[in-house]
Amino acid sequence: QVQLVESGGGLVQAGGSLRLACAASGRTFSSYTMAWFRQAPGKEREFVAVITRTARTYYADSVKDRFTISRDNAKNTVYLQMNSLKPEDTAVYSCAAQRATTTGYDYWGQGTQVTVSS
């Protein structure tokens, strides 16, 4: 069982930056694909960014060129650097882990609130 704990959320003005972190328990972090999702009030959860075991990255069009996902396998942590934040980025951000042998995400964190004021 893997536990994921997010941190770094908060209130920021439009145009500002935040860096989210997701710390994972266990000894097999480097074997997981890690992703960030977000869910705004009244909306469905949506994909934000993913980083594979080999550090390939993919982004939703809405955050491309503003957000950067990275990982530090020595610290069992995945990050989401968010720049040029917009009010529409306001959501609960959650990280997720996918094992090498599955197609869906196997583990989810509780989420961290990001609020961007205009």
Image: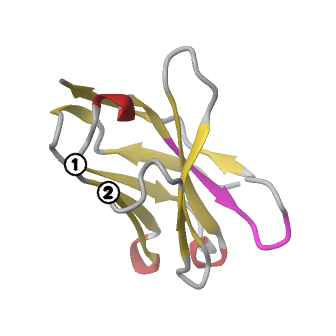
Residue occupying the point 57% across, 57% down: 35
Residue occupying the point 48% across, 36% down: 111
Residue located farthest toward the bottom when viewing the structure as drawn: 54
The mark found on residue 76 in the picture is: none
The percent coordinates of residue 65 (x first, y second) are 35, 62
Q: Nearer the viewer, residue 90 or 32?
A: 90
Residue located farthest toward the front when viewing the structure as drawn: 61
Q: How many marks?
A: 2
Give the residue type that dot 2 points to.
Arg
Q: Nearer the viewer, residue 67 or 106?
A: 67
The percent coordinates of residue 15 (x first, y second) are 16, 42
Magenta residue span: 94-102
Q: Residues within 10 Å of mark 1 (few under 14, many from 20)?
A: some
Residue that mark 1 sits on: 84
Q: Quadrant of residue 104?
A: bottom right
Residue occupying the point 25% across, 42% down: 85
The percent coordinates of residue 18 (x first, y second) are 23, 47
Up/down of 109 relative to 97, above or below: above
Give the residue type that dot 1 points to.
Ser
Tag 1 and tag 2, C-beta contact below 8 Å: yes
